[in-house]
Image (spheres, rainbow, N blue to C red):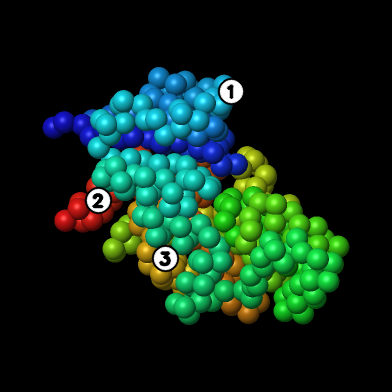
Amino acid sequence: MSKRRVGLLFGGRSGEHEVSISSARAIASAFDREDNPTRYDVLPFYIGKDGCWHGCDIARQVLDSGQPLSEESNDRSQLWQFPPSVTEVEVWFPILHGPNGEDGTVQGLLQLMQVPYVGSGVLGSSLSMDKLAMKSAFDRAGLPQVKYLEVLRSEIWSNPCVFPKLCDRIEEALGYPCFVKPANLGSSVGIAKVRSRSELEAALDSAASYDRRIIVEAGIANAREVECAVLGNDNPKASIVGEITYTSDFYDYETKYTEGCADLLIPAPLPETIAQNIRDLALEAFQTVDAAGLARVDFFYVESTGEIYLNEINTLPGFTATSMYPQLWNATGIAFSALIHQLVELAIERGGAVES
């Protein structure tokens, strides 16, 4: 039986470049365990911070060191010049977090290559990455969410008469505390929790520097943050539920990716009826945005009232040592190496369905 050649694609131009490298190292290690070496040959490809693609030799150096490539090219003619070994790839495993990685852009490229790839397609990726589009889809599906408002950069960076009225509207509709987020960035980048007018003004200005569309969400008192992993295509399944606890003010980028800053409780100490409701909602969210392969779905749970609020779906969750997604499946009974194998099989299944 011949081995299938998997293209492990990592790095990228987003602010989560280093996280992508960490995820790729964990995935590459999983391909070397259990039965995977007899099933797959892994061909790593690294996209530098300048957007240039690098073949297996340089990609392996980055995987071994865990550090980004220090040299960047200013030659735009090198952009999107693929290494020759790209033609050998039979299925792609993209692990590019953030913009240009999980927002449908690289998925569209891989679609044009006519090669199956792990994860959601263009629609599922782009819809899930854009927080406003995602929440609009969840609204149409009747899924429970916190109150939120859409804000445009043009409203924030406007004349002195418009901006105060915008802040008035936010205070009246949502109150404090509230969260200000760029609509189209991942992993808590550019997010701020605000409790006053001055903090709101500063947070809006900061978010506008990242994105032209901003979302402001109401805060929930005493909410527990719980997450559920989803695996599958047309008939997905949900993992057990996990909980995140931390001492920082909220689950920001540093807390998320710094080992020891957050604790993962797996399984989450929840009543079974609540846990089952969360699993059901996770599957509904997955299918609402037309996700595929994998996703992590995040919720707020208010213990005093029993209320559950859907926060967001992440169609390309982290695979680092501290990441919730692989840990949830491990606790559910699917080890890391088996999870990687299933994701590749799901990509091939979906790719064949699209071709037919």
Residue 341's quadrant in the figure?
A: top left
- Residue 294, percent across and down? 39, 54
- Left or right? Give the position of 299 relative to 137: right
Q: Residues within 10 Å of mark 2 (few under 14, many from 20)?
A: some
Disc 3 and disc 2 in contact, CB within 8 angstroms: no
Hey, which quadrant is residue 199 in on the image? Answer: bottom right
Mark 1 lies on residue: 70
The C terminus sits in image quarter: bottom left
Q: Is the Cβ of the residue at disc 3 closer than 8 Å to that at disc 1?
A: no
Q: Position of residue 221 (x, y in %)?
A: 72, 71
Residue 336 bears which disc, if any?
none
The residue at the point 68 percent across, 61 percent down is: 153
Q: Report the residue marked by disc 2.
A: 351
Whole-Å distance between the Cαs marked 3 and 1?
37 Å
The Cα–Cα distance between marks 3 and 2, rounded to whole angstroms, is 18 Å
Q: Which mark is residue 289?
A: 3
Q: Nearer the viewer, residue 262 or 283?
A: 283
Tell me if I can see residue 296 in this picture.
no
Could you tell me the amino acid type at mark 1? Answer: Ser
